[in-house]
Amino acid sequence: MNENLRDKYGIPKDAVITIAGTVGVGKSTMTKALADSLQFRTSFENVDGNPYLDLFYDDFEKWSFHLQIYFLAERFKEQKRMFEYGGGFIQDRSIYEDTGIFAKMHQEKGTMNAVDYETYTNLFDAMVMTPYFPHPDLLIYLEGSIEDILGRIQERGRAMEQQTPVEYWLEMHERYERWIDSFNACPVLRLNINDYDLMNDPDCSEQIVERIGKFMQQTAVLKR
């Protein structure tokens, strides 16, 4: 049935689809559901081997540059791996969010100095924003009101998230909305989190696959 779903809605078997959005929108749930529906592999962020993460949380200013460079290198390698494998991947979080959201936030808040930020963005542009970099076929942006997102964060009850001030989530929501409005590295399909309920109604994943298929076909026509 899953293979027929992919064929039914005309989604290429070598497609690479990236899921983006702020904390609490359901990126991981969407990644797993789409991978299952399309018989694709998944690509999740690996934080276990990150040598800078604990250091960063102890001293943002000292380690923010190192952390962002590490993320850039790891995501770059993962992006190449997916395409060298022949595609057929759903990816949880994009390489573009690191520079468009997090590095920019550090620079604006003073936890990354101007020289480090310029070095980082120059390196990002040289590595990623070129015709030679394998950009995803589609970026799915999960969006919702800040009230809905805060409700989901409360629902899943992760200790670190519960202790985070609401102001932080408000700022992240605003930053993501500004970022996606100017994003143009690959086609973007926006999905509102109120339009489906993958947790309680797994069958609605076919509705999402149908939307993806139609959108990708429209995008392909526009490229001709």
Image (cartoon, helix red, strand yellow):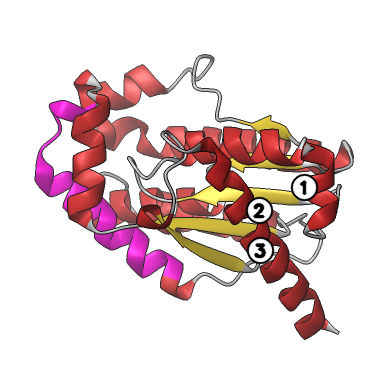
Q: Give me the C-alpha separation between circle 1 and circle 3.
A: 33 Å
Q: Does residue 24 lie above or below 215 as drawn?
A: above
In the image, residue 6 lies at what x, y percent?
79, 49
Spatial CA span between label 1 and label 2:
8 Å
Number of callouts: 3
Task: Report if the CB atoms under discs 1 and 3 are less than 8 Å apart.
Answer: no
Q: Is residue 194 toward the left or the right of residue 19 in the image? A: left
- Label 3, on which residue? 129
Residue at left 25%, top 44%?
111
Residue 200 in the image: x percent, y percent?
A: 41, 34
Q: Is residue 89 above or below residue 63?
A: below
Residue at disc 1, secondary structure: helix
> Disc 2 or disc 3, which is closer to the eye?
2
Q: Which residues are magenta?
A: 161-180
Q: Residue tagged by mark 1?
A: 5
Q: Which residue type does callout 2 highlight?
A: Val
Instruction: Please tell me in which quadrant of the rendered image residue 129 appears.
Output: bottom right
Tag 3 secondary structure: loop
Residue 165 at what x, y percent from top left? Answer: 10, 38
Residue 173 painted magenta: yes
Mark 2 neighbour density, 10 Å: few (under 14) some (14–19) many (20 or more): many
Q: Which residue is mark 2?
A: 209
Residue closer to the observer: 94 or 198:
198
- First reached walking from the N terminus: tag 2 or tag 3: 3
Question: Of discs 1 and 3, which sits in the foreground?
Answer: 1
Determine contact: label 1, label 2, CB under 8 Å. yes
* Residue 95 seen in the current view: yes
